[in-house]
Image (cartoon, helix red, strand yellow):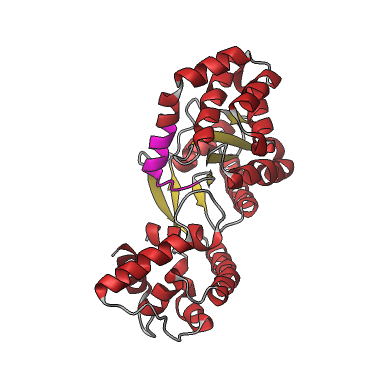
Amino acid sequence: MKFFLMILTAGLFFQACGGKSDDVIQMETDKKNSVNGISTKSSKLSCEKLLERHASCFVPDFEKIYNIPVGKSPVKGSNDALVTLVEFTDFQCPACKHFSTVTIPAIQKEFGDKIRIVFKHFPLSFHPMGLKASIAAIEVMKIGGNKAFWKFQKHLFANQDKLSIEFILETAKLAGVDDAKIREAIDKGKNKDIIKQDQLLGNDLGVEGTPWVYINGIHISRQSPLEVARTELEKAEKLVKAGTPKSKIYTFITDHGKSFHKVPMDKKIRKQLIESFKKPFLKKCEEKTDSPIIKIFRECSTEKISCGEFRSCFENKFNK
């Protein structure tokens, strides 16, 4: 089910770096269908009918709360913050730039000291400058501390189009760090062990692209980060009133001795998620009538098929 939801959110609706393009999926699907003797012509089932039958299948009736340790990662904000946003990110990823320069500042403006931001390095394999920037960022933090790191991070994302070795060094100097030491770190490939730790953590959590974001342990896909943060703040404030220390809120919510635990999804939030799915689904479905993903939806759709059977059919056809 997780894979199924990932295809929906990353492949159709959520702008991120990583994952397969629709053209790649088209070629793979046509090849698989050719081998299996399946026609690539889509059925005549309308987008509206698909939505009517299966909209509720696209949102689970529970949500996972992931246990993501802050560790020694860069943190912006107080340990007493009631909301913790953890971002797996890549300095060379355009979607990460938007999240860092637009989305996070909007959240911080509303929440102030009630939110903290945790940075996890997740440079993608096809972003070589992303890796070098992470190496440099970690060295900046080692030398200049947390404040220097966030100054470096902000300037690098704001000027992502200039990303190069020389600009990384210039940004390190701007953050108050000796650029010669940063060049040495890049040349020697230092700090890769720290990056690897974040990547392994991300892999364990199922991170498949960037930015990959969690708010108090909840993975953000189609949801509005701002709306989720508001909901989580309300929950955290109730916990504080019940006696939980502010500094313990994050671990109280997320750390249950395993990588994640499930809780029932709030009915209001689930309804909002289903509604948020409808408009973009219809838009994509009507604009890309030959989309391989939409084709699979149609091939799997029958009037009385259950959500579990529909998801299983989709995953089986996609993975063949």
Residue 284's quadrant in the figure? bottom right
Q: Is residue 2 left or right of residue 234?
A: left
| Residue 312 visible in the snapshot | no
Residue 66 appears in the picture as rendered? yes
Residue projecting furthest to the left: 36
Question: Who is closer to the viewer here, 68 or 221?
Answer: 221
List x then y, in percent, for residue 136: 55, 23
| Picture quarter with the C terminus | bottom left
Quick one: 181 or 138, which is closer to the camera? Answer: 181
Q: Reply above or below: 208 against 303.
A: above
Tell me the residue at 49%/25% (across/down): 72
- Write the residue at 60% across / 42% down: 241
Q: Is 4 located above or below residue 132 in the figure? A: below
Q: Quadrant of the N terminus?
A: bottom left
What is the magenta range?
197-209
Q: How many labels were placed on the picture?
A: 0
Residue 227: horizontal and vertical position, in percent? 63, 54
Judged left or right of residue 101, residue 71 is left
Chief SS of the magenta region: helix
**Residue 28 drawn in magenta:** no
Asked whether residue 200 is drawn in magenta, I would say yes
Q: Residue furthest right?
A: 109
